[in-house]
Image: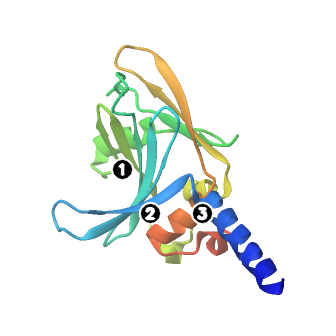
């Protein structure tokens, strides 16, 4: 009886752990230039859109990519970048990153018709884990408002359930511990 009870407890713990991590997954892809493996934390929503987070060595900057589904006819407007926010926090308009990038060539923002890449965190652990990456591991949902080339705007969102474990794995920092107050 004791063995059955212990086995049941272990199974319940495994299922709980899997479901907490289920929305986010960590994948590995080879970088096109160096052929080095790069870990990517990714989540998809019901519309098929995705949001992913990855780190770029050697500076260890952490970037995000918001991508529209391949099956969506929409394209992201080149002049009006998306904005995003976590839960009910202040939105961040990616226009700021785009303007700084165009003015100073800082490499903060990249856009193609179906996706945008943007920097989330500078990656310098000695300067602290701060900003949106903290909200991404503590929050419940991330929302995106994007403008289409046809002139309209649309909204989509992604769960952040399981993001702390996935982000911790890709950047090699225990984000739960690093963001404790």
* Mark in the foreground, 3 or 2: 3
Residue 178 at x, y percent in the picture: 62, 73
Q: Is residue 109 placed above or below 133 in the rendered structure?
A: above
What residue sits right under mark 3 in the picture?
Answer: 164
119 on left or right of 9 = left
| CA gap, disc 3 and disc 1 | 23 Å
Q: Is residue 150 visible?
A: yes
Tell which residue pokes out farthest to the bottom in this image.
2
What residue sits right under mark 1 in the picture?
Answer: 108
Label 1 crowd bin: few (<14), some (14–19), many (20+), radius 10 Å: some
Q: Is residue 62 visible?
A: no
Q: Quadrant of residue 91?
A: top right
Which of the labelled discs sits on residue 41, or is there none?
Answer: none
Residue 167 at x, y percent in the picture: 51, 63
138 on left or right of 45 = right
Sequence-wise first label, 3 or 1: 1
Q: Is residue 8 placed above or below 104 in the rendered structure?
A: below
Q: Residue sitting at 38 percent across and 69 percent down?
A: 60
Look at the numbered disc 1 and give the secondary structure of its residue: loop
Q: How is the image coloured?
A: rainbow
Sequence-wise first label, 3 or 2: 2
Asked if the residue at tag 1 contacts the one at tag 3, i.e. Cβ–Cβ closer than 8 Å, the answer is no
Label 2 crowd bin: few (<14), some (14–19), many (20+), radius 10 Å: some
Q: How many marks?
A: 3
Look at the numbered disc 2 and give the secondary structure of its residue: loop
């Amino acid at each position: 009886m004791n063995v059955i009870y212990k086995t049941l407890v272990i199974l319940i713990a495994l299922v709980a752990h899997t479901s907490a991590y289920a929305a986010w997954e960590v994948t590995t892809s080879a970088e096109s230039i160096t052929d080095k493996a790069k870990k990517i934390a990714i989540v998809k929503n019901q519309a098929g859109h995705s949001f992913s987070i990855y780190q770029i060595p050697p500076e260890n900057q952490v970037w995000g990519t918001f991508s529209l589904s391949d099956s969506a006819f929409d394209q992201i407007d080149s002049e009006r970048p998306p904005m995003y926010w976590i839960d009910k926090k202040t939105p961040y308009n990616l226009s700021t990153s785009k303007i700084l990038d165009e003015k100073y060539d800082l490499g903060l923002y990249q856009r193609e018709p179906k996706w945008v890449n943007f920097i989330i965190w500078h990656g310098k652990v000695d300067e602290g884990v701060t900003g949106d990456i903290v909200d991404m591991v503590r929050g419940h949902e991330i929302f995106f408002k994007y403008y289409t080339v046809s002139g309209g705007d649309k909204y989509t969102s992604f769960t952040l359930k399981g993001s702390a474990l996935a982000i911790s794995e890709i950047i090699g920092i225990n984000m739960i511990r690093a963001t404790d107050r």
